[in-house]
Amino acid sequence: MSAHPHPLADKALAKLHRLAEGNGLSPADITLIGAEEQGIAFRAEMLLTLETSLEKKRYPGFARAARRGGEATQLSSQKEMDSARAGFETQISESSRWINETVAQLKEAPGNGFGMMAADITLDGMARVFSASETCTSCQGSGTAPCTVCQSTGYVTCKHCQGTGQELCPTCNGRGTDPQSPHEHKYCPTCAGATYINCRFCLGRRQVTCPACNGRGRTSCAVCGGHGKFTLEQRVLPTVRAEFRPLESAELPSGLRRALDRGGFKLLNRLAKITVGTAEDLGNKKARLAYEAQFPYAEARARLAGKAARITVIGEKAVLRDVPPFLDAPMEAALDNAKATLDKALKLRAMGDLLAVLLSGRELMDFMRQYPMGLSGQVVTRMREHVLRLVQERTLLARAGASCFCLAVLGGIYYALLASHLRAGFAAMLFPAAAYLFDAFVCGLSLLGLDMALRFAAASHMRSLTRPGEKVALSGQRTGVLGLCVGACALFLYLAMLWFLGAVTR
Ligand SMILES: [Zn+2]
Ligand SMILES: [Zn+2]
Ligand SMILES: [Zn+2]
Ligand SMILES: [Zn+2]
């Protein structure tokens, strides 16, 4: 051990000790050989480039600009609109407002936007909408078009009389005689013997008012929807392209470079104290923002379970990188011992933690969060298999006991149901085949009850293995081969009882 103080490496060592505690490694197995500590001031800059995105729209009717976000300006022609828009674009690039708004948005991002690669920042507060109207060329602004149904006459031929103006008399059906007194040769009172009357729809005029234009001869223009004009709209949205660039990255220690290559510069958002300079206007729609990330850094040489390792420690919270899977060895030693009982394996804290996670039905990720380093994925997979197998073995006796008890209870219930002629009564009440429905219902209910009972037995047994306060989820228990066997036994028991009682009553 060197005589120099190294507070960060000591913090890292304490973290490793906490991980190793109860996991088959003593504090003496994890020692610090030496460490180089330094304060790092990592400088970087963000290059900001103003770009404007233009969104064009054309729709019939009046301008709806106010609804679309941004200050709206109405102009009388398209030419005026284009020049007003160009003027606005120049105006925003010449003032520094876009820079201030961008910096304000960056300050709300984590780490003031430190490490943000190739991002587009939209300045919605500065958006502007320009609009101008354009006369509809189809109707020359009138909003109407000649009616095609009546060819602009306003009238169409009467369909009822096919344009004849006459229809067969409905009273005499065209006979001309009075239907009330057929034998007296009287004329029909309606048509007076003419057999035809004036059409009741067009009143003899042979044509009716055009239904499409209501007799006006013109309908509303289909191109502009009757508005007579279109609105041209241009929405200018100032957008800033932000490019983050580290400065002097060549001088970084190798461990830090590896961590940044893997985690990105955003990694430092959480670990470092980040300061932002004031933005510098470079002109020509460009600006620069300077950053500095300050944090303590250490490269520690340590001995972990007999092996030398170089560990990277970053930031005040001592975030560790490059830690070898030093807990693998004690875990594998426990796993390789084939005769290890559950209790022996559970003496290792990590095994107990894994058992608690698995039994409570939580995700494996929960376990990985407790052990973010020190264990390789391969070993965690082996540990999981081992723990699950041991749980299954350990609960076998409890579940077998529950099975025997359940079968005895089911036998009693079956006898009561069948001997009381409930099944026969059910079939007699409905129809003969209903007896099979009764069987299916009873057997289905039995399987459900067995499944629940076995899970409950296993879970309550597991509760005695876990630490107090840990939850045990019923869903974490599998039915297994035993469950299937007991289910089959229950079905056989029911059938045997059915045959036996049937034979006895016969
Ligand atoms: Zn039109
Ligand atoms: Zn018409
Ligand atoms: Zn008539
Ligand atoms: Zn008619």
Image: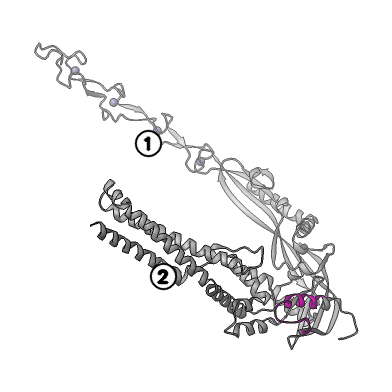
Given the image, on which type of amino acid does mark 2 rest?
Cys
Question: What colour-coding does the image apply?
Answer: one colour
Q: Position of residue 318 (x, y in %)?
A: 79, 73
Which residue is drawn at the image coordinates 90% and 84% (left, top)? 3
Q: Position of residue 37 (x, y in %)?
A: 85, 79
Q: Secondary structure at mark 1?
A: loop
Given the image, on which type of amino acid does mark 1 rest?
Val
Q: Which residue in the protein does label 1 denote?
A: 149
Q: Are marks 2 and 1 in contact (CB under 8 Å)?
A: no
Q: Is residue 487 visible?
A: yes
Left/right of residue 176 with respect to residue 27 in the rendered view: left
Residue 485 numbered tag: 2
Q: Position of residue 99 (x, y in %)?
A: 78, 58
Which residue is drawn at the image coordinates 64% and 50% (left, top)? 234
Q: Is residue 284 visible?
A: no
What is the span of residues highlighted in magenta in the rendered image? 11-28
Q: Nearer the viewer, mark 2 or mark 1?
A: 2
Does label 2 or label 1 sit earlier along the sequence?
1
Residue in front for this viewpoint, 100 or 335: 335
Say whether mark 1 is within 8 Å of ligand 2.
yes
Left/right of residue 468 with respect to residue 385 in the rendered view: right
In the figure, 23 relative to 78: above or below?
Answer: below
Q: Quadrant of the N terminus?
A: bottom right
